[in-house]
Structures are given as C-alpha cells and as structure tokens.
Amino acid sequence: MANEYILEDSIGYIVRNFTKSLRIKILENFKKARININIEEWIALAFLNRFEDKNQQQLGALLMQDKTAVTRLMDQMETNGIIRRQIDPKDKRNKIINLTDKGKELYLRVVPHVEKTIDQAYSGIDINKVELVKSTLLEMQENLTDD
C-alpha cells in the first residue's frame, strides 16, 4: 500500500512517547528522593511558583485542564499544605491560589530532580537541535490553535 499511514513515524506519536518516558523518569527520580508528588502537582507547583495570585480558572488554562480536574488537584494540594486558596477581593466568585511556605520549599526541593531528568534527556544532543525542536513544536501548536 503506497498510502499507508505509519503511526510510529508521526510527530504526535513520537511526542506522546517522549512525554510518557519523561514523566516516568521524573517520577522515578521523585521516588528515589522520597518526594511524594505526582506530575500534575509538579506542573501546578511550577506555574504557581512563577505566576503568583492566579485564580483556578487561570491555572486551569495554564494546566490545560477542566474546572473539575483543577478543583480536585487544588483540593489535594491544599490538604497537603502546599497551597492556600483565598477569596479574590475583586471577584468573590474566584479563589486566588498561592503557594504556602511548605509549597515554596517543596518547589525548591523538586527542581533539581526535574533538571537532572531534563539534562539526561538532552545528553549528547546539540542545544541548537533542542531549541529547534522546541520552536517547531510551538509553531505547530500555534497552527492548531489558530482558527
């Protein structure tokens, strides 16, 4: 068949498998370091460290998750003392989310393990190739979000 679609050659399949491998390795490194968080918590932690005073809707957009998933994640993180939710004084319907001191300490403890994993993934690869892949994927994502 001349027009056979080869899934394993598609960018989506390759990116999916890379993402899965990266997640597995990061979680292995967390486990070795006795850090008890999952990938979704790590991503939320990173965003909240970078962008203070986000509400749940804004965080959901950054995480690319629906309202229910974000609420569940924030409930879990609040229970673990990582975040604090407060009513937004400008709009009582919203809750502003901030890291607690424990959350900030956790972020600082987690970053070296994530960086170690990224360094392992980049090992032996020219940084220019890495930057090209990143910029190309961002362009492709933009193509898919433009209507």
Image (tube, rainbow, N blue to C red):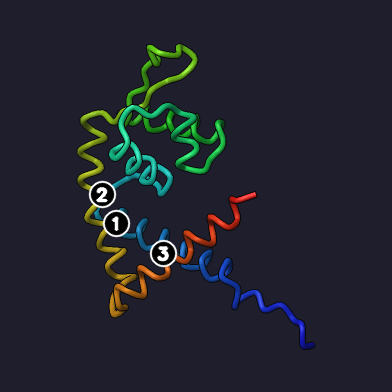
According to the picture, the residue beneath numbered tag 1 turns out to be: 114
Q: Which of 130/56 is in front?
A: 130
| Residue 49 to residue 137: above or below | above
According to the picture, the residue beneath numbered tag 3 turns out to be: 134
According to the picture, the residue beneath numbered tag 2 turns out to be: 110
Callout 3: SS: helix
- Residue 110 percent coordinates (x, y): 25, 49
- Residue 83 percent coordinates (x, y): 32, 29
Are the two marked residues, 2 and 1, in contact with CB atoms closer than 8 angstroms?
A: yes
Extreme-right residue of the structure: 1
| Type of amino acid under label 2 | Val
Q: CA distance from mark 2 to mark 1?
A: 7 Å
| Type of amino acid under label 3 | Lys
Residues packed near mark 1 inside 10 Å, few (<14), some (14 to 19) or many (20 plus): some
- Residue 62 percent coordinates (x, y): 45, 41
| Type of amino acid under label 1 | Val
Are the two marked residues, 3 and 2, in contact with CB atoms closer than 8 angstroms?
A: no
Callout 1: SS: helix
